[in-house]
Image (tube, rainbow, N blue to C red):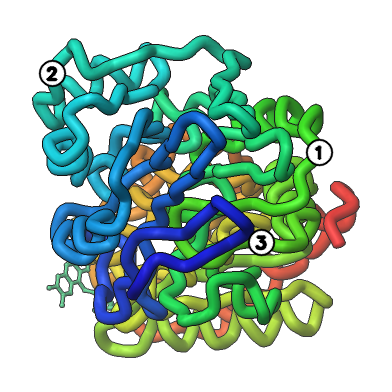
């Protein structure tokens, strides 16, 4: 992809990664992603905002061939998908100074061996004049590492937000054209990357409310010409109450747990509770993460395997614990052959979740009438608790 003009003297640079299907060796990328860098030419100084993932360096450096001078490079975030090409850029522009938060300075030295003399550390709210354009650096810690910041371009009212408000989408459209599609991708991104830091993100959103923003230019995905769309979505994901929804990650080897899951889905639907089941043997964990953003209850469906939960169920519990959703209730259902500590093991895996545990439903072998009745009672208890809490 070539450099693209956003407005006079403001350009998108970077790389659209159409084919990547896994990020951080963990996160599924059904729609690829992009690594966005930006170039701003002021009347006196030129600044580059971020770089690209090292495998994309060739494409990025080719874009820089037409750029004779860079005075400053802003590194919003030390993670390599944005910072990984900094050394090459500094080599090409040895006079350029690298602008970061004080924390990012240390991290970039540790991660990339960037020489100390390249840095200028900026305070929260510090400004930099490019002549006719003014940049304000706003520290936004834990979006999603401790060192992160964003840049506000005052004259053009553009927020360069790096991972904040990002989405993993590869597209030839520079700007968001389909808000529905981007909503889904941005919610997935929020769930996987931002959700563990929900409370600090809330504070960072409040901080940004002071800026009049006409466009958001993130580090991944398309640019937002209507920023309210994504800012409102972030407010909802961080401030909103959980919904009247059960997320039901489950796995079954010989169909007994599966029959329990099927029964519970029907019982919950009868009681007016939405259900999002995820068969862990085939599921995309990004979809599971996304569903956790606003689910009031998690029910894990698992057989007992070697005295504990099936490893896929353990993985789902571990993931939910790491992502720290705002879930309020949790239960476990499943089949066993002779005995074990499935519930105790799962309960020990979720110390971060502030949930009330609703009585589990375990049954020996294939589910009996008694087990189905217990599942009906579980569905009724969930529906009652959701109603008592006003979850809609
Ligand atoms: C590899 C393996 C290990 C198992 N380990 C246990 C166990 O430790 N304790 C137990 O009660 N049942 C154990 N079982 C039996 C299953 O829990 C039992 O067959 C259950 O009904 C399977 O549920 P499913 O049909 O949903 O897969 C094991 C089964 C398999 C295949």
Q: Secondary structure at mark 2?
A: loop
Residue at (32, 83) in percent of width and height: 282
x and y percentages locating residue 287 in the rendered image = 48, 71
Task: Look at the picture and state if 323 lies above or below 121.
Answer: below
Residue count near mark 3 (Cα–Cα under 10 Å), binned few <14, some 14–19, many ≥20? many
Instruction: Check if mark 3's residue and mark 1's residue have beta carbons within 8 Å.
Output: no
Q: Please give the residue where the numbered disc 3 appears in the rendered image.
A: 224
- Disc nearer the start of the sequence (3/1): 1
Residue count near mark 1 (Cα–Cα under 10 Å), binned few <14, some 14–19, many ≥20? few
Q: Secondary structure at mark 3?
A: loop
Task: Look at the picture and state if 314 lies above or below 77.
Answer: below
Instruction: Check if mark 2's residue and mark 1's residue have beta carbons within 8 Å.
Output: no
x and y percentages locating residue 279 in the rendered image = 40, 80
- Disc nearer the start of the sequence (2/1): 2
Quarter of the picture containing the C terminus is bottom right
Q: Please give the residue where the numbered disc 1 appears in the rendered image.
A: 212
Q: Secondary structure at mark 1?
A: loop
The one nearer the camera, 254 or 298, is 298
Residue 115 badge: 2
Instruction: Name the front one of labels 3 and 2.
Output: 2
The one nearer the camera, 314 or 325, is 325
x and y percentages locating residue 154 in the rendered image = 71, 34
State how far apart marks 3 and 1 are (Cα): 14 Å
Residue at (85, 47) in percent of width and height: 389
**107 sits to left or right of 187:** left
State how far apart marks 3 and 2 are (Cα): 35 Å
């Amino acid at each position: 992809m070539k450099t693209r003009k956003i407005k006079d003297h403001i350009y998108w640079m970077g790389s659209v990664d159409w084919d990547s299907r896994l990020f951080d060796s963990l996160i599924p990328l059904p729609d690829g992603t992009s690594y966005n860098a930006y170039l701003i030419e002021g009347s006196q100084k030129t600044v580059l905002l971020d770089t690209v993932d090292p495998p994309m360096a060739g494409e990025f450096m080719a874009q820089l061939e037409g750029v004779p001078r860079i005075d400053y490079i802003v590194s919003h975030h030390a993670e390599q998908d944005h910072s990984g090409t900094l050394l090459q850029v500094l080599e090409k522009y040895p006079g350029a100074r690298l602008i970061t938060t004080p924390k990012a300075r240390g991290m970039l030295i540790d991660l990339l061996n960037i020489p100390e003399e390249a840095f200028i550390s900026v305070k929260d709210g510090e400004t930099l004049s490019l002549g006719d354009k003014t940049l304000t650096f706003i520290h936004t810690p834990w979006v999603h590492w401790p060192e992160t910041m964003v840049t506000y371009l005052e004259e053009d009212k553009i927020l360069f937000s790096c991972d904040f408000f990002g989405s993993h989408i590869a597209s030839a459209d520079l700007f968001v054209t389909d808000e529905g599609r981007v909503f889904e991708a941005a919610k997935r991104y929020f769930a996987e990357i931002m959700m563990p830091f929900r409370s600090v993100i809330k504070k960072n959103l409040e901080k940004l409310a002071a800026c009049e923003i006409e466009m958001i230019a993130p580090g991944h995905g398309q640019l937002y010409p209507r920023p309210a769309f994504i800012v409102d979505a972030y407010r909802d994901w961080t401030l909103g109450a959980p919904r009247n929804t059960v997320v039901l990650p489950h796995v079954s080897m010989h169909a007994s747990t599966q029959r329990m899951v099927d029964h519970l889905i029907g019982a919950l639907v009868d009681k007016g509770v939405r259900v999002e089941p995820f068969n862990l043997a085939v599921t995309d964990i990004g979809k599971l993460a996304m569903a956790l953003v606003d689910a009031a209850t998690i029910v894990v469906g698992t057989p007992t395997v070697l005295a504990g939960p099936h490893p896929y169920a353990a993985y789902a519990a571990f993931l939910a614990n790491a992502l720290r959703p705002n879930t309020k209730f949790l239960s476990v259902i499943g089949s066993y052959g002779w005995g074990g500590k499935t519930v105790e093991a799962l309960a020990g895996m979720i110390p971060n979740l502030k949930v009330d545990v609703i009585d589990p439903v375990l049954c020996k072998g294939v589910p009996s009438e008694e087990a189905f009745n217990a599942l009906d009672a579980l569905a009724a208890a969930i529906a009652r608790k959701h109603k008592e809490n006003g979850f809609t």
